[in-house]
Amino acid sequence: MIANALHTEHLHAPEQIAQAYGASTRALVSLLTELSHQISVIQGQLATHFAGHPDRDIYLSQPGLGVVLAARVLAEFGDAPGRYANAKARRNYARTSPITRASGKKTIIRVRYARNNRLTNALFQQAFAALTGSPGARAFLQNAPEARPRPQ
């Protein structure tokens, strides 16, 4: 039934408009082809430069980080060896630590809104890739105390 409807006569655009759309489409395809080529060139250059970094293996050992995303996370955190005292200091820099306010019997936990958005985006992409591609990361999250619903 649908196939018959698609083969019936339908409205056509005037020839000049169809040619204009064709020219526009050819130009867009040409732009996308060149953009794809330039992305490949930049990825090659990035892989070459990242291969020489001493912490490369540490970053690539983390689930969800490939060469491009690992280089992005490294660039956002910086590579000074003594810059962060511990994992909490690194998390505070990324501003992914929650804000906890306690008053009497009431405790409120809020998310931080002021943060390094490039770093947060890269870490979000890492987490998503790890959860979809690493059974170990998925099992860890499902067994983590934070993942369980809290009694209220």
Image (tube, rainbow, N blue to C red):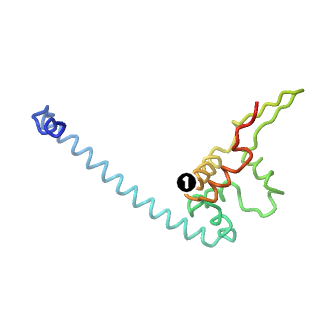
Secondary element under disc 1, as helix, strand or loop, is: helix
- x, y percent for residue 126: 60, 54
Horizontal side, residue 86 vs residue 64: left or right: right
Q: How many marks?
A: 1
In x, y percent, where is residue 7?
12, 39
Q: Residue furthest left?
A: 9
Q: Residue 42 at what x, y percent from top left?
A: 49, 62
- Viewer-side residue, 76 vs 92: 92
Residue at x 63%, y 44% (from the top left corner): 117
Question: In terms of depth relative to the viewer, which is nearer, 52 or 120?
Answer: 120
Position of residue 63 measured from the top left corner of the image (x, y, whole percent) = 62, 60
> In the drawing, does residue 12 fall left or right of residue 132?
left
Quadrant of the rendered structure where residue 39 is?
Answer: bottom left
**Residue at point 62%, 65% (across, down):** 60
The N terminus is located in which quarter? Answer: top left
Neighbour class for label 1 at 10 Å: few (<14), some, many (≥20)?
Answer: few
Furthest residue in direction right, as rendered = 104
Seen as rendered, the residue at the extreme front is: 151
Quarter residue 79 falls in: bottom right
Label 1 sits on residue: 132
Quadrant location of residue 17? Answer: top left
Please report the residue visible at 50 percent of the width from the left and 63 percent of the height from the top. 43
Q: Is residue 99 above or below residue 135?
A: above
Q: In the figure, 149 relative to 128: above or below? A: above
Most foreground residue, 22 or 121:
121
Q: Amino acid at mark 1?
A: Thr
Q: Is residue 78 above or below residue 27?
A: below
Q: Quadrant of the C terminus?
A: top right
Direction from residue 3 to residue 86 in the image, left or right: right
